Image: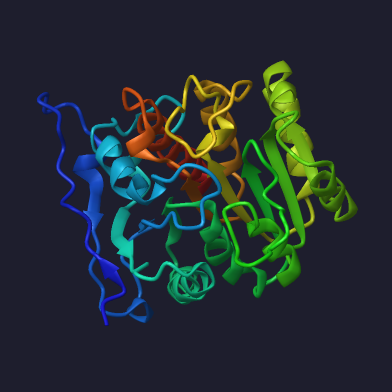
Amino acid sequence: MTRFSPSRPWDSTASDPNDETFGDVVERVTVPNLETGLDADVVLAGEPFDAAVIGRRGAAKGPNGIRNALTGVKTHSFDAGPLADDLEVGDLGDVDVSSIDTRAIQRQVREVTADIHDTDALPVFLGGDNSLTVANAGPLVDRGRVGVVNFDAHLDVREVRETPTSGTPYRQLFEEGLDAYACVGARHHETSTAYAEYLDERGGGVVTAEAVGDDPGAALERAMAAVADVEHLFVSVDCDVLDAAAAPGVSAPTPGGLTTRELFELVRTVADDDRVAGFEVVECAPPLDEGDRTVAAAARTVAHFLAGYAGGEDD
């Protein structure tokens, strides 16, 4: 059975031949079995699923929305230079998420993500909703001490009641053995006291959006201190970490969030850590967007992450 549906071709939209974009450098990857390996440094994998969203749906359209926006983004970084000089980027297409049962989808997708983690390529997951973070980061929990740096307005450690949701992934991961966790960009008055206390009891780090605004470097240092003792690092970006003005196309847009410039800098810095073993951008909902602001931010978040990762690969 095919485990991925292919993405649309990657073709540059630039009219100037000097404008190298991601449309020029991302290659579609077709493999009958991931055990054969992947001829790429980084692979994109879409997860068009939003049945577990708490709030407004639309994130199932996120993978293709991010791809479409990323196609026209130029590859040059003033820090890392031209991306194609350092990284080969492939696109596996979209994972089969035909079921609407969240538990079944988490199990189904996890089988695929585990195989991706077994390759030498770094996985970059394009969500989809936050419930699949369990599938994306979960395989790492079995492979040593694992920490997550989560850029998010919310802690996402709700209790699982009838079924997992986009608000339960990190509680699920803690129950599986997650060793460390830091949330960057958390908002006041967006989290219940019970969940803040749950995370505090487990030694999790919380860095508010205000702290990032005051001093992004110091804020990130606090977050990284919470995951200092792990072997593998998974990085997650929930687009609602951004201020509603920058990212209206999310399940729960609220004021008081990070600016895109702050997020790009933080993601680029974290990506340079040689423990990074996976990355995701979730909760981008193009049908809810205004002026393509959210998909543009999500696509450029991927670009900045890859620039930071390419810089780390050179070290």
Quadrant assignment, res 295:
top left
Regarding residue 82, the answer to whether it shows in the image is: no
| Residue occupying image coordinates x 84% and y 42% | 193
* Closer-to-camera residue (251/297): 251
Quadrant assignment, res 241:
top right
Q: Split into 4 quadrants, where in the image is the N terminus? A: bottom left
Side (left or right) of 17 relative to 39: left
The image shows residue 223, relative to residue 135, as above or below, that is above
* Closer-to-camera residue (223/56): 56
Question: In the rendering, at what x and y percent does residue 8 appear?
Answer: 18, 52
Side (left or right) of 68 relative to 165: left
Question: In the rendering, at what x and y percent does residue 311 appear?
Answer: 49, 40
Q: Split into 4 quadrants, where in the image is the C terminus? A: top right
| Residue occupying image coordinates x 68% and y 36% | 184
| Residue occupying image coordinates x 38% and y 81% | 35
Q: Residue furthest top?
A: 214
Side (left or right) of 206 relative to 169: right
Q: Residue furthest right?
A: 201
Side (left or right) of 304 relative to 90: right
| Residue occupying image coordinates x 50% and y 72% | 110
Q: How many marks?
A: 0
What's the coloring here? rainbow
Question: In the rendering, at what x and y percent does residue 21 appear?
Answer: 24, 35
The image shows residue 124, relative to residue 68, as above or below, that is below
Question: In the rendering, at what x and y percent does residue 24 appear?
Answer: 19, 42
Regarding residue 151, the answer to whether it shows in the image is: yes
